């Protein structure tokens, strides 16, 4: 009987169990946070790339209306590829030696739970700027 009580009072193996409980308490939240940060970073990269493509397409256009249409088309292509709801804002004057700026925003869902939908969103944005060539010819009116 004394041996049984001595075995029950012995503390060998408790450190292992405590370590496993602590490890599970740390690793399980990390397993949920890594995909969350990856989703936010993917949205940020998508917004930055869409802004860069939009401003590049805009400065290569022959007129200001064509520049807006080209920028919107570039954002639509990015939206079709990624499925992100991208919103474009184009700033600046379309004139020789001026700078055009594109701002693209998107909302990233933090978590998606079946039957409940998305839980929380984060707004991320991407900005890009490009100069209109100083020596190029620009159309005063849009071409037919």
Image (cartoon, helix red, strand yellow):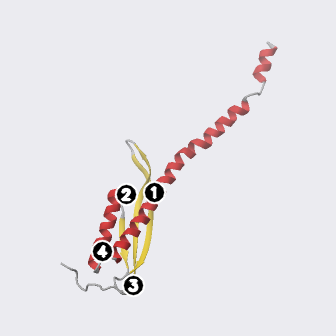
Q: Position of residue 126 (x, y in %)?
A: 44, 67
Please give the residue where the numbered disc 2 appears in the rendered image.
84
In this view of the protein, which residue sits in the foreground, 73 or 106?
Answer: 73
Gap in Å between the C-alphas at discs 2 and 3? Answer: 30 Å
Q: Position of residue 88 (x, y in %)?
A: 36, 68
In this view of the protein, which residue sits in the foreground, 71 or 8?
Answer: 71
Gap in Å between the C-alphas at discs 1 and 2? Answer: 10 Å
Give residue 42's mark. Answer: 1
In this view of the protein, which residue sits in the foreground, 70 or 25?
Answer: 70
Q: Earlier in the sequence, mark 4 or mark 3?
A: 4
Q: Earlier in the sequence, mark 4 or mark 2?
A: 4
Most distant residue in the front direction: 135
Residue at 39% of width from left, 73% of height from top?
A: 102
Give residue 68's mark. Answer: 4
Give residue 29's mark. Answer: none
Q: Position of residue 107 (x, y in %)?
A: 41, 59
Most distant residue in the top direction: 1
């Amino acid at each position: 009987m004394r041996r049984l009580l001595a075995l029950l009072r012995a503390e060998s193996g408790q450190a292992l169990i405590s370590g496993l409980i602590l490890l599970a308490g740390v690793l399980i939240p990390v397993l949920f946070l890594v995909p969350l940060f990856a989703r936010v970073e993917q949205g940020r990269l998508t917004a930055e790339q869409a802004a860069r493509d939009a401003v590049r397409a805009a400065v290569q256009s022959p007129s200001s209306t064509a520049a807006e249409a080209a920028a919107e088309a570039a954002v639509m292509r990015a939206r079709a590829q990624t499925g992100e709801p991208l919103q474009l804002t184009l700033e600046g004057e379309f004139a020789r030696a001026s700078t055009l700026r594109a701002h693209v925003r998107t909302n990233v869902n933090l978590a998606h739970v079946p039957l409940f939908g998305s839980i929380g969103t984060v707004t991320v944005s991407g900005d890009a700027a490009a100069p209109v060539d100083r020596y190029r010819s620009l159309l005063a009116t849009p071409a037919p």
